[in-house]
Amino acid sequence: MASAQVDNTALKKPTSAYWLWCNDNRAKVSSLVGGKITEVSKKCGEMWKALPDSAKLPYEKAAKEQKDAYEKFVATDEGKKALTEKKAASAEIKNDKVQKAAAKEEQFKIKEEKQNERACKAAVKAVGKDDALKKPMTSYWMWLGDNRAKITSLVGGKGSDVAKKGGEMWKAVSNADKAPYEKKAKEQKEAYDKYIASPEGTAALKAFKDATSAAKDSFKPKEDPAETVDEEDAKEVKEAAKDVKEAGTKRKVSPQMDSVVEKGAPVAKKGRGRPPATPKAPTAAA
């Protein structure tokens, strides 16, 4: 246990002369400029530059001693082993973070896609449609409309049960009873076909289709360039992934980290926003 503590201390990266001086003088500087970190750092930098070489010398000497001790330790077999283990442990932590972030991102993506799909359907449904453009019903659906209340009273209000029972009953309806519905359905279809074939109907149908397409297109993913993570973060992830592989750790490297090692490029994030507002759909010409 004692050796592990010594190793951890020996593996601590040496502090520079400037930071050693800062640690000794932070309270004093903070009392001059206040507790704001940026102001303290700025003032420390100014004061360090103004220090004479004689005042810097003790800190430079201490920093050199730390650096020499660190380099001497990591050059030994014990130091190399301890450093590899430390890197592997750090890489494991980063690997976990990458996996958790990827899982969270995937959950968010699924949720966002569902929201987008619902919003898209609502936008398409909101597109105005002239009654003349509505496709005529078949004889069966006309009959079902007239008999839905009766069928519902027999099987209950569940839509699937009503449809199933309606289909069974329609098959049993005599040709004579079907004739009025078939005649009406035929008249409506002929009127619809005639309207759609006319210049007015063709224009109205095109306007409706264009409006529907525009509503759908507004919800398609935007082809924005991928935003890469911060360069330093990407470098750290890449190095961590390599450490996991080199150390031969038992835990599986996440695909995200593996990709960074193979491609040698920063991890990319897809820029996505919330679904756009439902567009105000134009009403097709009558």
Image (spheres, grey):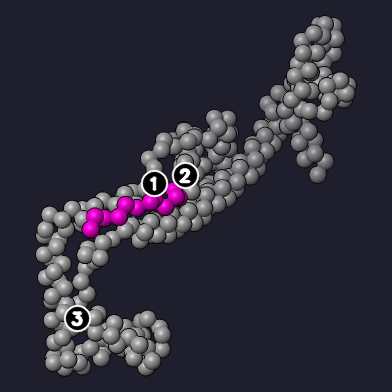
Instruction: Report the residue marked by disc 1.
Output: 221
Q: Amino acid at mark 3?
A: Ser
Mark 1, Cα crowd under 10 Å, few <14 / some 14-19 / many 20+, is: few
Quarter the N terminus occupies: top right
Q: What residue appears at the point 69 percent right and 28 percent down from the top-left corner?
A: 74
Q: Quadrant of residue 190?
A: bottom left
- Helix, strand or loop status at disc 3: helix
Front label number (3 vs 1): 3
Q: Amino acid at mark 2?
A: Arg
Front label number (3 vs 2): 3
Asked if disc 2 and disc 1 are in contact, CB closer than 8 Å, the reply is yes
Whole-number angstrom distance, CA of label 2 to CA of label 1? 8 Å
Mark 2, Cα crowd under 10 Å, few <14 / some 14-19 / many 20+, is: few
Q: What residue appears at the point 29 percent right and 82 percent down from the top-left corner?
A: 145
- Residue 276 sits inside the magenta stretch: yes
**Which segment did they paint magenta?**
275-286
Q: Measured from the top left, where is residue 219 in percent x and y? A: 38, 50
Q: What residue appears at the point 79 percent right and 23 percent down from the top-left corner?
A: 40
Whole-number angstrom distance, CA of label 3 to CA of label 2? 47 Å
Task: Report the front residue among 225 and 176.
Answer: 176
* Mark closest to the chain's N terminus, 2 or 1: 1
Instruction: Report the residue marked by disc 3.
Output: 139
Residue 152 visible here: yes
Q: Measured from the top left, where is residue 260 in percent x and y? A: 48, 38
Instruction: Report the residue marked by disc 2.
Output: 272
- Helix, strand or loop status at disc 2: loop
Mark 3, Cα crowd under 10 Å, few <14 / some 14-19 / many 20+, is: some
Task: Report the front residue among 158 and 147.
Answer: 147
